[in-house]
Amino acid sequence: MTKTILSAALAALFAPAVFALSPFVVKDIRVEGVQRVEAGTVFNYLPIRIGDTVDDQRIAQALKALYATGFFRDVRIEAEGAVLVVQVDERPAIARISISGNDEFSNDVLLKGLKDAGIAEAQTFDRSVLDRVEQEIKQLYLTKSYYGVTVRTTASPLERNRVAINIEINEGQIATIKRIRIIGASAYSESKLLDLMNLGESGWFTWWNKRDRYSRQRLQGDLEEIRSWYLDHGYADFAIESSQVSITPDKRDVYITIGIREGVAYKFSNVKLAGDFLVPETELSKLVNIKPGEVYSRERLNEISRKLTDRLGNDGYAFANVNPIPELNREKREAAVTFFIDPGRRAYINRINISGNNKTQSEVIRREIRQMESAWYDRERVDRSKSRIERTGFFEEVTVDTDAVPGTSDQVDLNVKVKERPTGNLSVGVGYSQTEKVVLSGSVSQNNLFGTGNALTLQVTSGRVNQNLQLSYTNPYYTQDGVSRGFDLYQRKVDTGELAVGRYATRSQGGGVRFGVPVAEDDTVSFGLSYDKTDIGVFDDSPVKYRTFVQENGDTATTLLGNVGWSRDRRDSVIYPMRGTYQRIYTDVAIPVADLRYARVGYSIQSFFPMTERVALLMATELGAASGYGGKSLPFYKNYYAGGIGSVRGYRDSSLGDEVLDKYGNRTGESYGGARLATGSLELLFPMPGMKEKDRSMRLSTFLDAGQVWPKGEGMNLWEMRYSYGVAMSWASPIGPMKFSLGFPINKKEGDRTQKFQFQLGQIF
């Protein structure tokens, strides 16, 4: 039997054929030398099959294919008559990877980083893997400013052609920024420019915000911040000429030097439009609100470009492009800007495609879309559609984009892609507030019942003041026009013994129906009718007014209550608003077919004004008035109350207003509430320092509160209002919303009950 060795190494593939092989037909193929790799794997990669005619060229191709798999250190192919024998020498496999000496990163994080680089258990091993392991881990530590890190790797052979990789890490010390210098600044101080940067020199608080940890990406972002600052304040010739980073030999201190060239400050001389407008030029000109003499600003140019693009998009020009070109007059230090407008082609919507809704019915999404098929593309309607879909609360993420329809020049498809979030909730919880003390609560809710968008909630709350059992159902699209309809059934118990108000107890049962009619995109008119039966309990220490009401009207009262309201919601977010306004007007009237006859009317407004990208100013006001009619008095338990964390912080809950006196004329420390209400708040909202930009679970604020209630017959005397100031925090925690405030009364009067620190944990119904 004659054996012909066709190849022993890759180099032999390109060497002259010493062992010439006469072509032959393969009758069988045998694989030898495999240990972990299945023989079938070799057959899959081998480009030769039984029945093929092979020669030197085919054998060379087969060797290349098997080497390319990376599974083998050596491959040989021999011929024994008409049998092709494939002999392989497998590379060892990585059996396990062990890591020691790591504190900054967990094993899971390091192993994931290695896996992303193609190094993981069960992968093939060669000596170059050890170098790659060291480099990958060092790169990971460099992102955390560990410039002195050392990594030592060893490979230990195991049975069955396997190896164990051992990684020993010496993290060393964190390198911190000791000095940042900015050379070339004259228009602005170095300290001002340093304030623009995310990086910073080591200081008292850098252990918290980690500003002194250098990274190349953060430095590039800071350089762009400085560049944007100058370009937005007139310096159109500004340039960053150099940025140098040096590290001390002990790898512990970092020094950064930034060289800049400011140039001179420019002002706008004139602004004009050019190009193909296709919409009335007067409408476009109104959007260019730059006046000669204003300081040159790249931000203003970009803002106007967006407005012009959006305006063209509203008329169907989905691919409009607006390019502002400044012409600089360096002698006069003026900039003349021309906005070149290219509207592109006008497009209309071919189809609206919805994807990602595995549970939610497509109709629930489609009914929120304001852009119609076969209509001209309208950017404003597309943006509004996205906003309305997000407001449903059914989705974690909503993306809307367009694709050109192949074979057409004027059609696009609108693609709406959603990522669903859980909309059902089964919860049992414990809350605490200074008013309610310990509150036990439980609820079963589904805000997207069977994917229809309807909501069903059963809610139970048990506290020392309030106990509540309520069943609610809402269909937000009772009609195709968006009219909503809802039903409520409830049983409530109230005992004010823990509040700073005159003591009483009530037990109410009732139910009602409600409707909401959209009269505009952001406006809704609501109305409803409900029936309520309330049992009233008074005590020996209850105020005389309360006992008198029960004597005149009985201890059981029935009410047929009608309500009409209007609301307008133009906030950019319900959870974390930064801009926009929410207004509400409500009117409740007890219809004179039951025991009670009274009316309540109120108005509230919240306005958010963005001060920076993450800081907003909130201005809020609430007004209310109530009165009995038809010879009936206003039920005392329908009074307004003020004071506390949801009203005027720094004063005890529900403590403002006329004081309750005992039969001897002494103060009891309790309040009657009032038939008139006025409260207001000015609050600066900002994120918790150190929180990531996308983390919106926690918010801090400084506030100025004002408020008071007055009895029937007295006007709203603003001089009698109470004022307070302080700081507050709200947190959307995993167990429910939490609120904390530290308030300081400004004009405390004799008899006022104050409470500086106030908090509420968990959802209080």
Image (spheres, grey):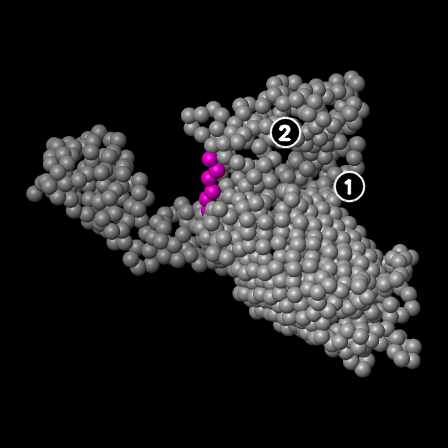
Residue 314 disc label: none
Taking the spot 87% from the left edge, 57% from the top edge, the residue there is 716
Residue type at numbered disc 2: Arg
Seen from the viewer's position, the closer of residues 694 and 17 is 694
Taking the spot 68% from the left edge, 74% from the top edge, the residue there is 507
Taking the spot 72% from the left edge, 32% from the top edge, the residue there is 232
Looking at this view, name the residue that lies furthest to the front. Answer: 593
Residue 763: x percent and y percent? 65, 64
352 in magenta: yes
Q: Element type at marker 1?
A: helix
Q: Quadrant of residue 405?
A: top left
Residue 347: x percent and y percent? 52, 27
Q: Residues within 10 Å of mark 1 (few under 14, many from 20)?
A: few
Above or below, comparing residue 187 to residue 764 in the picture: above
Above or below, comparing residue 641 to residue 495 in the picture: above
Q: Main secondary structure of the magenta part?
A: strand
Q: Which residue is mark 1?
A: 191
Q: Element type at marker 2?
A: helix
Q: Which residue is mark 2?
A: 311
Residue 593 in view here: yes
Q: Which residues are magenta?
A: 351-356
Seen from the viewer's position, the closer of residues 112 and 704 is 704
